């Protein structure tokens, strides 16, 4: 038995941002707060959206950190309350959209970001329109947000049906100006989401289809997209949506569970942190789900071993770090990493049962050869 429910309306197409005033009208937006990535503000696009939407955007907030923090959420929530908005619009990468989701929950639920990160149940949320400017996080089509408590080296994910955006406007042309390293790291996130979804206890024939197609597109187009090929960037935008349609249902698994402490404590970018152990976990998972061997053939590889070799080669080409030494992580802190990884909620989604010894072995395998 499986079920699939996805409440986000998705509009995909070149130049669709130009129609935002129409979409706001269709959604019944009265007063919205725009949470924008800094580049959108600096380029003047944010102000253009304000003018185009003729009073429906009451204010703009930016300066969201790459891993949105409690303070980022509170700053935006304060503005949302001041402007008495009925909608939030997020335009940016996964961090901006994740921050916006948390703001929706905090404002509607009349709570603080600290209460949210300490485990308060999400019972209400303002409606959200998500507009990605990067292809990778897929936050525009998921009900999950990830917030960091920097002072405690904690990065926590929250999932609720209430956090799905009401509308996702995916305009691939917004990704064309992304710097090479942003395109690279975000593209690896598509692969991590896809392979994690395939290795989830919650996977289904439909999520597996989406994950396979997303991984196939990402493996085929990521290098060309990094080199600036716009057609490849279009395909990555589609791949990100497909990956989101997969892991929005299955959740992420071991590679993501191991990534949070790497980001929170050592500053490793999210997607690079996920990719760090992704190869090891996929090889472990195939032992518990032999179907993965057939699924990687649909992605375009002869077997799991060939996929892992291609993934590690791609990481090298994109200048992603692959050893503990390269990440400047001392072996003496391994037990901290193991403890945090094992405690992550999404570790329970992994198809292979995981214990602390297994996590320890995965990280020990990442020592310099």
Image (cartoon, grey):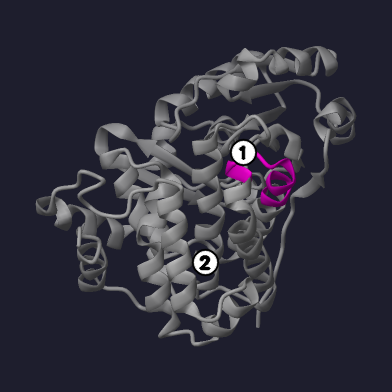
Tell me which corner region of the image, top left, top right, bottom left or bottom right, holds residue 32: top right
Task: Identify the image quadrant of residue 270.
Answer: top left
For disc 1, the marked residue is 134
Query: Does the magenta portion include 216?
Result: no
Vertical side of 176 occupied by 210: above or below? below
Residue sitting at 67 percent across and 78 percent down?
205
Q: Main secondary structure of the magenta part?
A: helix
* Circle 2 residue: 195
Comes first in the chain, label 2 or label 1 = 1
Q: How many marks?
A: 2
Q: Is residue 291 shown above or below 143? A: below
Residue 233: in magenta span: yes
Image quarter (top left, top right, bottom left or bottom right) of the N terminus: bottom right
Crowding near the residue tagged with mark 2, few <14, some 14–19, many ≥20 C-alpha atoms within 10 Å: many
Quadrant of the snapshot with the C terminus: bottom left
Q: Is residue 303 left or right of residue 70?
A: right
**Between 226 and 343, the one nearer to me in the picture:** 226
Q: Position of residue 134 (x, y in %)?
A: 61, 38
Badge 1 local density, few (<14 within 10 Å), some, or many (20+)?
A: many
What is the magenta range?
A: 225-236
Rendered location of residue 207, percent (x, y): 65, 69
Please determine whether, in this image, residue 294 is positioned above or below residue 356: below
> Could you tell whether 219 is left or right of 156 in the image?
right
- Please determine whether, in this image, residue 362 is positioned above or below residue 341: below
Where in the figure is residue 295, as x and y percent of width and height? 59, 79
Q: Is residue 119 visible?
A: no
**Image spot of residue 367 (x, y percent):** 20, 60
Q: Please name the residue shown 14% across and 51% down the image.
A: 333
Where disc 2 sits, the SS reads helix
In-front residue for pair 282/81: 282
């Amino acid at each position: 038995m499986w079920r699939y429910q996805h409440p986000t309306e998705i509009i995909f197409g070149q130049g669709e941002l130009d129609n935002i005033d129409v979409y706001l009208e269709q959604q019944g937006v009265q007063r919205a707060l725009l949470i924008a990535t800094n580049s959108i503000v600096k380029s003047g696009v944010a102000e253009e959206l304000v003018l185009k939407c003729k009073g429906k955007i009451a204010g703009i907030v930016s300066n969201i950190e790459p891993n949105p923090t409690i303070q980022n959420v509170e700053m935006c929530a304060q503005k949302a309350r001041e402007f008495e908005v009925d909608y939030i619009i997020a335009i940016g990468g996964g961090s901006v959209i994740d921050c916006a989701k948390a703001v929706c929950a905090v404002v509607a639920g009349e709570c603080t970001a600290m209460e949210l990160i300490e485990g308060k149940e999400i019972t209400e949320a303002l409606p959200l329109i998500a507009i990605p400017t990067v292809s990778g996080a897929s936050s525009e089509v998921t009900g999950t947000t990830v917030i960091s408590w920097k002072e405690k080296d904690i990065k926590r994910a929250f999932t609720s049906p209430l956090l799905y955006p009401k509308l996702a406007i995916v305009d691939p042309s917004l990704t064309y100006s992304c710097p090479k390293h942003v395109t690279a790291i975000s593209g690896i996130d598509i692969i991590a989401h896809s392979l994690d979804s395939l290795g989830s206890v919650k996977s289904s024939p439909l999520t597996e289809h989406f994950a396979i197609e997303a991984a196939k597109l990402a493996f085929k187009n990521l290098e060309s997209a990094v080199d600036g090929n716009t057609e490849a960037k279009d395909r990555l935008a589609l791949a990100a949506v497909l990956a989101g349609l997969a892991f929005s249902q299955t959740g992420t698994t071991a590679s993501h569970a191991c990534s949070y402490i790497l980001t929170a404590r050592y500053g490793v970018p999210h997607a690079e942190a996920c990719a760090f152990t992704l190869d090891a976990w996929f090889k472990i998972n195939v032992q518990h789900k032999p179907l993965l061997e057939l699924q990687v053939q649909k992605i375009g590889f002869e077997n799991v071993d060939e996929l892992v070799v291609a993934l590690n080669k791609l990481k090298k080409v994109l200048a992603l770090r692959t050893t503990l030494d390269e990440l400047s992580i001392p072996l003496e802190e391994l037990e901290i990493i193991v403890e945090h990884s094992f405690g992550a909620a999404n570790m329970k989604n992994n198809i292979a049962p995981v214990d602390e010894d297994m996590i320890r072995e995965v990280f020990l395998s990442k020592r310099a050869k």
